Each structure stands twice: as structure tokens, then as C-alpha cells.
Image (tube, rainbow, N blue to C red):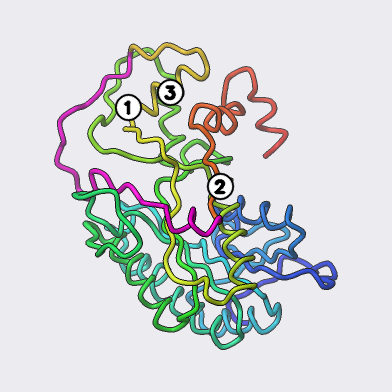
Amino acid sequence: MPGCQSGGSEEAMGSAPRVLVTGASGLLGRAVCREFQSGSWSVIGTAYRRARPRLIRCDLTDEDAVRGLLHEHKPDVIVHCAAERRPDIVERHTEAAVNLNVHATSMLAKEAALCGATFLYISTDYVFDGRNPPYGEDDTPNPLNVYGRSKLEGERETLRLCPAALILRVPILFGEVESVSESAVTCLWLRVQDTTESCTLDHCQQRFPTDTRDVAAVCRKLCERARQEPSISGIFHFSSNQQMTKYEMGVSMARAFNLPCDHLIPLTEQLAASTLRPMNSQLNCSRLELLNLSVEPRPFNTAITDCLWPFTPDKRWRQTVFH
């Protein structure tokens, strides 16, 4: 099919429900695939730049490719994780980011509605300006940057073309990474480890770092419930409840591995930045909780240990074996 390359012959799907995960090679997409597999779903993962064996290489901005993909695999559920999620990159490469974050989302939502698949779109707390937290699902968005605007437009296109869709807004994420630079949380590890010189870390912007395993579990619970109850639709929020600045994340990482943290200096003045970010976009997650669709978020100190231990000096051989 145009724009798509299969990652090899698929195993017989049987009668298990089928989920198509876009961005399956990414930080969240990998966790979502594992979670659905553990729940006995048949998982079809797509990727593009980082396509690998067992994934289908597909350009989600190619309408014929998307249509052909859904026609061939006939998923019961689509979890749309693929996005350009780096705000600074979106500012510099706006057209490409909007193509993925808005236009590809629009096509997927339209095709999902046509084929009757449950559609779950992953969005962000950056749709809010961070001036009046916490934010409920019905609060008025006011994104500060192009990334937030593109994800908000993706939400609107999703609900316009697929009114029964699910939207899950999440905050800054971390999890099992292939390199520490893959997450804005784990990338702090390089600064934590380098004790040779002092390093300033932001101590103004409040964040709620959330483990991708928890987000993936919520995705599966949401999709399974929505398939049983069509009234389950619209916007949901999920987030860890631990409020932390980047400085506090760095200190927590150091303590988790019994490393010194005296070289980490809290930066308490808000510096001018090329890309504006909300000061505190805390999400109110009560809608998920009321429907018993939430999970208890993992504590940051234990969750961050899970994903950083392969990058400690005495474990580096394991990193090579696993990746």
C-alpha cells in the first residue's frame, strides 16, 4: 500500500480483539503495546522514522496509506500515540509538526469513525496556560505555544470527525527509555551524574512526571470500557499526583542511586525562553477516578529507578544486551 511497509507476516490474529498503536516505537507507544499484549490483545504497531521488525512502517500523513492500513488490519481499537511532542522542535519545524499532530490525527479519526473502531487520541496538559490549576476536562484551554495549539487542534478534529472518540490528556512522561535523551525527565540523569561542575536546574515550573506504564494501563482500561459502554467518550485526564520541578526530579534521581546532589543548583528565577511553557498545568483526574478507570500512579523515586538502572556505570553491559 502507498506509504506503508509491513514489518513482516503477522501471526494469525484469532478471535482476540485487535488494537492498532501509532507511534509504537516511541516512549509511550512501546508501553501501550506491551500493556495491550499483556491483556491478550492482538497488537499491530506502526512507526515511521524508527520502524523496526514486528512494526509496520507507515507514513501517517499519507491518506491512502492510512486508509489501506485500516482496511487491511481492521482494528477494533486505535490508540494514536504518534506525535511531535518536543515543543522546541515544533516551534522550529511547525509545518511538519502540524502535519503529524493535526492532519494525520484528522485522517485517523475520520477513518476510525468510518470503520467503527474505538479511537483514543493522546493529548497533553500543554493545552492549558498553567495560570489557574488544577484543570478539569471542561476547563477552557489556552495553549501558550505551537505544540499546545497543535495538540488542541488535534483534539477538536478528533471530536468533529469521530464524536465517540476518547481523548486522554497526560503531562510530562518518562519510562523505559532507549537513551536517556528520549524523555525530558530522564535526560536530567546526565546532569545528575556529572558532579565535576555545578549545574542549575529549573525550580519554578511545576511538573507532574508520570510513568508510561501507568498511562498505558489507563489506555487499556479506557478502551475496554468504551467498547462495552458507548457512553464512555470524550476528554479524560490522567497524571501522577507528585508535583516536582526539574531540580526536585534531579535531586530525587541522585538520592535514588545514592549519588551526591550538591552540584545541582535550584534556579528560582524564570528566564526568558524561546518556547513558552505553562508554570503549572496540573490536571484534575477525577473523571477517570469516578468511573473506576484510573490506576494508582507509581511513586517517582521507585519508577525512575526502574528506567535509569540500565544507565548506571556498573549496569552498562545489561543495557547493551537489552537494546
**Start and end of the magenta stretch?**
263-292
| Local secondary structure at mark 3 | helix
Relative image position of residue 292 (x, y in whole percent): 55, 55
Is most of the magenta stretch helix, strand or loop?
loop
Taking depth in this image into account, of 307 and 25 the one nearest to the observer is 307
Crowding at mark 1 (Cα within 10 Å: few <14, some 14-19, many 20+):
many
Task: Return the residue at label 3.
Answer: 252
- Quarter of the image with the N terminus is bottom right
Q: Quadrant of residue 22?
A: bottom right
Q: CA distance from mark 3 to mark 2?
A: 23 Å
The residue sitting at 66% across, 53% down in the picture is 35
* 288 magenta-colored: yes
Lower sequence index among marks 1 and 3: 1
Mark 1 vs mark 2, foreground winner is 2
Seen as rendered, the residue at the extreme front is 290
Amino acid carrying label 3: it is Ser
Q: Position of residue 187 (x, y in %)?
A: 43, 35
Residue identifier under label 2: 295
Q: Which quarter of the rendering shows the C terminus?
A: top right
